[in-house]
Amino acid sequence: MKLGELHAKVVHDLDRPKVRIPDFGFTAKDRVESQRFKKIAAEERKAIRLARRFDVDPKLSDYVYNRPVMRKENERLIAEVMAEARGPFKTMWIEFIDEFNGDVIGCLQEDFGHEISFQFFKDGNFCDRGVTIQRQASAMWVGRLAKNKESRLEKSFAEQNSIQAFGVNCEFSQTTDADPYLRLIRSTDLVRKEMYCRSENSFNEDFHPGRLIRFVTMLMITLNYPWVTHERVGVLQRGKCKNPRVVPHDSYYRCRIELPKDSVDMREPVEPRDEFYGKRLHQVRGHWRVLRNDDGSFRKRTWVGQHTRGDSKLGVVLKDYHLKGPNLGARRT
């Protein structure tokens, strides 16, 4: 399977999961539970189909795989990186190549503000474990239910969960409640995707979410480079026509972004009007905005969430993304 093909394959399989997904609903005890599994699959299919797509070029994957957080299983470094995790869009599909076996991996990432979740897919292999990270401190160590009634695994085996969730064993005897990695573990849920389970107690032996979550998070941090705002002075803005002869039309683009960016040189892009009468409705991805004082010194950084701009009466512009990367030569081992 080639990069960019997994999205359509997963959407296709989830359309008739009982027929197209091996062992789907195998653990269902009755018809009611079987219908519940189908409903969850339908919700997941809708989320994946409507998600903003990000296909990761292999050169950019090499760049991310060579970051320290991927090469060194350091608890404090992982905690610092995960604290920066922000989704440019609320629902995203991220497709990339696994560095170990060359498999195409798809990640459904959903950022609801109070929590961020990760669910991974491979061709012919629907992983029966998801990971959800709570951002609210009050939610730590509290048993919770997912919005689609999936089950959260018990946290009595926190050390085992830390290995599965982030790839690093946490020695609790040497930590305190103030330890950032311990706080991260306590706010992390492993979600059991019951409709994909092959038996009551089984799970994907070859699935290691820690490494994949760190990859996706580091990729998002690379994409979320700060946009520095500079006001234009002395530019006369053209007014809108009161009675334009408008023929609304929709467009789809595949936008290419070359990463990493030098945030010092970045400026918030000024989007010109498509027409004299205005701009069509389009989504703006979430991003960090850097605010500076009059002398150019740093004042603060703030997160600007996903939002929309433009007029839907003129049409809609949809974008998916192809993330390009630098040429690093041979990959380090």
Image (spheres, helix red, strand yellow):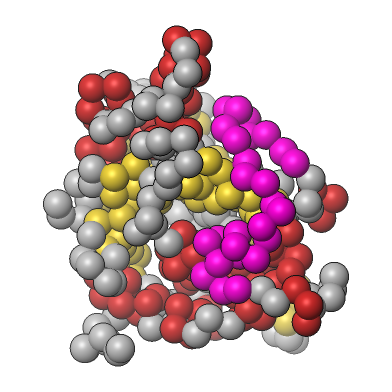
262 versus 258 height, above or below: below
Magenta-span inclusion, residue 155: yes
* Quadrant, the C terminus: bottom left
Q: Taking the image as drawn, is residue 120 in sight? A: yes
From this viewpoint, which residue is outermost toward the top? Answer: 31
132 versus 49 height, above or below: below
User: Horizontal placement of 20 versus 143: left or right?
Assistant: left
Q: Nearer the viewer, residue 204 or 101?
A: 204
Give how far across and how far down residue 230 sits, in percent.
Answer: 61, 70
From this viewpoint, which residue is outermost toward the left? Answer: 1
The residue positioned 60% from the left and 59% from the top of the image is 161
Q: Nearer the viewer, residue 268 or 65?
A: 65
The residue positioned 59% from the left and 62% from the top of the image is 160
Give how far across and how far down residue 56 sits, in percent.
Answer: 31, 62
Q: Which residues are magenta?
A: 143-169
User: Horizontal placement of 97 versus 278: left or right?
Assistant: left
